[in-house]
Each structure stands twice: as C-alpha cells, then as structure tokens.
Image: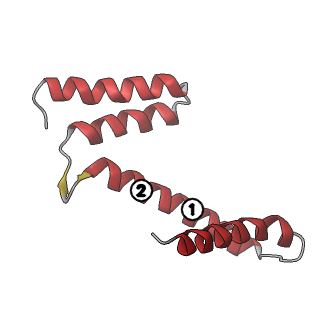
C-alpha cells in the first residue's frame, strides 16, 4: 500500500475518533436512535461471532468449534470468570476433535 494511502487512512481514522469527544455536546441524538445504534452494535458483534464460529475458509467449520462457542456463551450468561470461559470452550472443542467430531 502506498505511503500516501496509509497516511490518509490514519488521518481519517484519527479525525473520526476525535469527532466523538469534540461533538459530544453539540450533537443530540434522539433516544430511539441511540437505542437502535446500540442494537446495531450488538447485531454486528453477533454476526461476527457466528461467522467466525461456523465457517472456515469457504465452508462449514464442523461441529466442534460451534460447540465450544456454545459452551462459552452459556458460561458468559452465567457470569463465569473469563479465563474459565476460554479454557472450557477450548477444552470442549479439543475433546470433541479428539473424539473424531469434525
């Protein structure tokens, strides 16, 4: 990537991030719009998790990985400590793969 493009993207990113604190008190969003933006962020995060959990390359990732993500989701809802969530999700995936589940 040319240096000019990198500098332009860096400047644009910095300006975009700076706009939030600078315009915080000048721009008022209606409550409904703020709620919808919050929901949109949640939907995007869920879509990212689903895509990462279910696909590998151009196909289905198999059943072991989604099972690990499901375990992580259940433990998250139960407010388990983060290191425990990671270890148990990885262990679930590893054990299923050892048992021959793709």
> Which residue is disc 1 drawn over?
41
Q: Would you say 32 lies left or right of 88 here?
A: right
**Residue in the picture at 73% in, 71% down:** 15
Q: Would you say 92 lies left or right of 31 here?
A: left
Residue 48, label in figure = 2
Percent x, y of residue 14: 70, 66
Depicted 83 relative to depicted 49: above or below = above
Depicted 76 relative to depicted 58: above or below = above
Badge 1 element: helix
Q: Would you say 11 lies left or right of 91 here?
A: right
**Residue in the picture at 90% in, 71% down:** 25
Residue furthest left as drawn? 100
Q: CA distance from mark 2 to mark 1?
A: 11 Å
Judge the density around disc 2: few (<14), some (14-19), many (≥20) Cα neighbours within 10 Å.
few
Q: Would you say 1 lies left or right of 9 here?
A: left
Percent x, y of residue 2: 48, 72
Percent x, y of residue 75: 46, 30
Percent x, y of residue 51: 33, 56
Tell which of 45 and 2 is nearer to you: 2
Q: How many marks?
A: 2
**Residue in the picture at 65% in, 73% down:** 12
């Amino acid at each position: 990537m040319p240096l000019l493009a990198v500098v332009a993207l860096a400047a644009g990113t910095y300006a975009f991030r700076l706009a939030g604190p600078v315009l915080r008190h000048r721009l008022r969003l209606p409550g409904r719009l703020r709620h919808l933006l919050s929901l949109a962020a949640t939907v995007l995060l869920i879509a990212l998790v689903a895509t990462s959990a279910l696909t590998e390359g151009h196909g289905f990732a198999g059943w072991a990985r989604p099972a690990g993500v499901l375990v992580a989701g259940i433990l998250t809802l139960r407010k388990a400590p983060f290191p425990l969530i990671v270890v148990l999700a990885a262990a679930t995936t590893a054990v299923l793969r050892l048992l021959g589940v793709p």
